[in-house]
Each structure stands twice: as structure tokens, then as C-alpha cells.
Image (cartoon, helix red, strand yellow):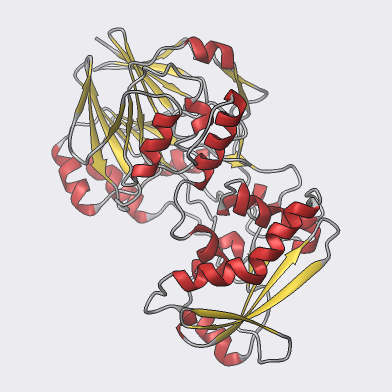
Amino acid sequence: MTLKISRILHAGYVFECNGTRIAFDPIFENPFSRNCHAFPDVRFDREQIRNVRFDAVFISHFHDDHCSLDSLDLLDRATPIHIYCLFDELFSMVRELGFVNVHQLHINTPVSVGPFDIFPREALDSDVDSMFQIRAAGLNVLNVVDAWIDPDALTELARQAPWDMVLWPFQTMRETDVLSPSRAQPAPVALPDEWIDQLRILNPRYVVPSSCQFLQEPWSWYNHAFFPISYRQFQEEVEAALPSTQVIRLNPSVSVVLDETSLQASPSLAWVVPVGEQDVDYRYDPNAEAPRTADIARHFPPLTAQQSDRVIDYCHSGLLAKYGEMELAPDSFFEKTRIWQLSVYDHSGSAMHYRYRLEGERMERIGNGEGPLAWTTEVPVWKLYAALELGESLTSMYMRINDAVFDAETEQEIESADIVDDPLIRCLFNDVFGAYQATQLRRLKARAGGPSIF
């Protein structure tokens, strides 16, 4: 027997063996996760996808670039769906979408599907992620997804050798560095040492650089600021460090057949349609200029009066209430009394400035002149509304944090502060689960004319 492996998009793959077909983290959308445009570019033949039958689908975690109800909506409702997730809400949403065979995955507990044995393996952040070990046709493949490997799990994975292929997340995405570009440190020029160390331990025959690069809007400065590692650099460094390992690039739709001695090209997935040049590489620019938030905000449409009222009400009261509900970390920058300014920019580039005094877990609105600022946050009003109502993720918020110079004492303290301790980030994204999928489900149910519990 042989094992056919095909790339869908991002961390999405189809594995086929002896007539059985399974999918991992299937995303059939471009853009995906609201504003991630596949790079290289592809489109999907939705009608063909509706006719594809999978014997099972495995989802590594709940993030919207791995678990999308819009994508699952294209599949037959009898398809078994296996998800690694600690939150019951996600399983309820998938069932409400109509799937009748939905299962929770557990670390190191295998699932057998025809000739396949799939083992969820422990990722570094086991509250969120999992990895997959796939055995079939006498072959052994590790799909790291976009997780990092837990040290104890690495010891176990070493015992599972030999490895025929590892699907490795080759990006060091700078999604938090772009939040405060004036304070960000340059990206390292080499792959992280622990990557090479871990790959040496695994010592696979083949490594696939996995988790695709993506672009955002054509005008976005993020298009040269997110991904410092190129496909070329990854291949050169990995093959230099592991002479017996071959790096194989799988663009979306591309298929290969793996056996015990070789890897051969195979007909591509017909329902993933490449658009334009495919062997493209992200061009990271460490000196990419970050435009002002006012200029970024001009790219977005104006809010309706109702939408604007939603944002204003949040800034006046909802934000304060949410902040008061959350528990502050003991080492938080905001454990000490701070004055924070939130600046919200509309489609004309004009800003409304809101000032708050934060004292531990308490927040109150204040006027100007009540003390020096210790933290600033800027955001386009359209993106703030989208985060409140449409499931927008932090990756595409165009939020700008501490793009200012504070007094000497504050500057020193900010050096050790965690950027995601930002009050707006915490209120929008901490303790919030499944906003993206819940928004999708409401829209899908409304389109179908049915009621929704969400």
C-alpha cells in the first residue's frame, strides 16, 4: 500500500490510503479567517467539494483558520468530525450545523479509520492545540499543524521513530510585533535553534514546510512584516542540518504518493484551483514602514448609525464592565494605577479619544489632564466594530499599541510589559470563545431560514 498526501490550504491536508480518505483542518475558503488571502493564490470549486466524501475529518484546534463552519458546511452531514477542543460550545455549534457524528479527541488516544490510525499528540499549549501522528500503509507521519512540540511529547515522539514525513510549521509569525512596530525588535535572521534540534531528534525522511504564508489587503504594510522566514531559507537550513532529510514544498492542491522507499508526484486535487504563479515566496522587510492608524482607517467603509452607536456604547460602558469581570494577572503592567488612552479612528481618519484610569481590576472613564498617559491603543472603528460583532481576530485588527513616548519611569516599566496585556486586547479576546464560529453559525442558520441558539 501507499499513502497519498494532498495539500488543501494552510494546515489543511487530505490523506488517502486503500480507498479511505480523511482530511485534516480543512479550509475551503480564500480569504480565510476573514482577511487572510492565500499566498500562493487559489480558489475553490465549491460544487466539486460538495460531492467529495471524506471518511473522517480531524480538526486540531478551534482557531478560525483551522475550524471554519463555512468550510464544514460544504461537507456531507454524516461525515464523522473529530475535534481537539476543551470547550463544549464548539461541539454544540458543529452539531447545530447538522453533523450527527461529532467526537472530542483526547491526547494519545488513537482513532482508527480504515487503514489509518490517528494519534492526537500533546502540543506545547495543550489547552488550545494538538498535533497528529498518522500511521497507515506501514508509514509514519507527524502533522505538527501550527503548534509547538511539548518537551515531554518530543521524548515520546522520538520513541515513535522512524518518521517518514513531518509536516512542520515553518513560520515565525510576528502577529504581536506588528502591534507595536516602533518598539519591536528585528526578527532573527536564522531558524530558531530548537527547530533544528527537534527535527534532528525526529530525523524524518521528508519535511514539508506547512502552514501557508498569507497576505492581507493589497495596501497593507503587514504584507511585508508578518513572516521573516522564506521557503528558500527553511529548505537551505534544514537540509544543511539534516543531510539525509529532503524538504518538499506542497503548494495548495499538490499531491504526492509516499511509500517506504520514495516520494512521487500524483494528480492534484481537482477542487483546489491554483491561481497565478505558485512557487512564490513572502518578501519580509524588517524596515517596512508602518503607516499611521488614521491612514489605515481610511481604507475601511463608514459605519452605519447603528453600528457607530454599538462602538460608542462599548467605549462608554461595555469595555468598563468587561474589564471589571476579568481577573488581572499578578505580574500585570496594570497592577499599578495607570492612565490609558484608547483612540478610535473613523473612515475619514478622524479620532475619538477615550481616557481611562485603571486601578487593578477596576476601570473608569476620565477626562484629559488627570495625569500622564502610561499606555495608548489605536484602532480603526470599523475593525473595532468587526471584533465586537463579526468575529474579527487580532491578526487583522490593525491595532497600534504604545506608539508614543512616555515618561522615563513608564518607559522602563513598559520594556518588561506583555503587549497582549493591552486592555482592549484583553476585553475583546480574553475569556471569549468561538466568536468567529458563532457569527458564522448565525449567518448560516439565517440563510437556511432556521432558528439558532447562538
**Residue lying furthest left:** 159
Q: Quadrant of residue 447?
A: top right
| 392 sits left or right of 210 in the view | right
**Residue lying furthest right:** 348
Tell me residue 201's x, y (percent). 23, 44
Look at 53% across and 26% down and name the residue there.
Answer: 28
Look at 67% across and 60% down and name the residue there.
Answer: 287
Where 226 falls versus 144 (above or below)?
A: below
Tell me residue 51's x, y (percent). 49, 9
Q: Quadrant of residue 378?
A: bottom right
**Residue lying furthest top:** 19
Look at 54% across and 14% down and name the residue there.
Answer: 271
| 49 sits left or right of 43 in the view | left
Where 333 falls versus 142 (above or below)?
A: below
Tell me residue 39's x, y (percent). 60, 34
Q: Quadrant of the N terminus?
A: top left
Where 16 falls versus 246 (above or below)?
A: above
Front-lying residue, 135 or 401: 401
**Residue lying furthest front:** 451
Look at 31% across and 52% down and name the residue there.
Answer: 127
Tell me residue 294's x, y (percent). 79, 63
Q: Is residue 239 visible?
A: no
